[in-house]
Amino acid sequence: MGASADGGADQNRLGCTAYPSESGLLRALNLACASFTACALCYSATAAIPEGCVTGEAAGKSQAYLAGLAAFAAGRVDESYVRLKGAYVACPGNIPYRNDYLVAAAISGHAPEALDIAAGLRAESLPTYVLEALGLAARDNHQPELALHYYDTILGAHPDVGARVGRDLALIDLGDPKGARTDLLALKQLGPGRVDVEEALALADEAVGDDIGALAATEVLLTLDPRHVAGLKLRYRVVARRRASPRCRLDAAAVARPPRIGQRVARPAGLRFSMGTR
């Protein structure tokens, strides 16, 4: 299960908590789930254990799965990808392994890999958190139409603010920032104070050429999360552009230095996580 549309945390049937993206941390799973072992992690007692997942090497691989979940929760997405991929390759019939591997692949920069596997799956059969990750992967892979397909699959089943944000980001990629902005402003009215909404709104404002609006949305975003990587990048980009414009001079004190930014954004907009939970 993902987070509820109003931004609160949901509980799945095993009591594992799924946190919304605006929580500011990669608290994607309740580590209490780690007490479940082998391929039965977060399965019901009657669920079938896939062939080849109960003996020697496969049992060891399940530890790789648990380690992959822990690495993801700690923000070590590259390590998580390697471990979860290994667990899935050793146990390809395990659907939770596959789902969480797809998410880790999408987040760690292996979008084509995730999309290739997902191409053979019915989107309607996938959990929301996997569909959101695939939407992100499609956007990263410059396939906004495919991203819309994944987000629309979610929204066709139930309301979901995160999916709407992801869909609006895909609209920006498709060249419709005005349409995205209209929807994002409506989302902001419904539930102010969401990091993902403010980030997407800033990007939409920038795309329509409204630098003042983009800066305003970015300041709200950085008030909510002062270390938000994408927000820091966007603020510097907009301020630098306006400073260079002969039509506009900003106070020098308002021009921030480029932030020291890591290689990868840990929490992409429009995506929540429920890895390790069913």
Image (cartoon, grey):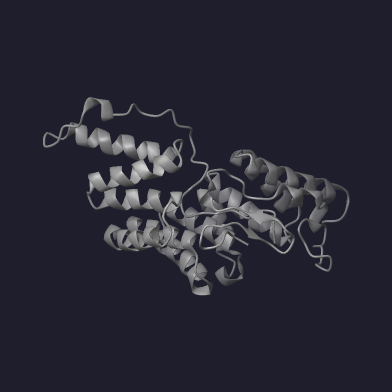
- Along the viewing direction, whichever of 146 and 248 lies nearer the viewer: 248
Say if residue 141 shows up in the picture: no
Choose top left, top right, bottom left or bottom right for residue 95.
bottom right
- Return the residue found at the far bottom: 156
In the displayed structure image, the side of residue 178 where residue 192 appears, left or right: right
- Residue 272 in picture, x, y percent from top left: 55, 54
Q: Quadrant location of the N terminus?
A: bottom right
- Along the viewing direction, whichever of 217 and 87 lies nearer the viewer: 217
- Along the viewing direction, whichever of 15 and 169 lies nearer the viewer: 15
In the displayed structure image, the side of residue 34 where residue 11 appears, left or right: left
Say if residue 36 shows up in the picture: yes
In the displayed structure image, the side of residue 248 where residue 93 appears, left or right: right
- Residue 200 in picture, x, y percent from top left: 38, 52
Q: Quadrant location of the C terminus?
A: bottom right
Q: Residue at x 26, y 48 (%)?
A: 213
- Return the residue found at the far right: 56
**Compared to 145, does 259 lie above or below?**
above
The count of marks equals: 0
- Residue 31 in picture, x, y percent from top left: 72, 47
**Compared to 256, does 149 lie above or below?**
below
Q: Residue at x 48, y 41 (%)?
A: 265
Choose top left, top right, bottom left or bottom right for residue 50.
bottom right
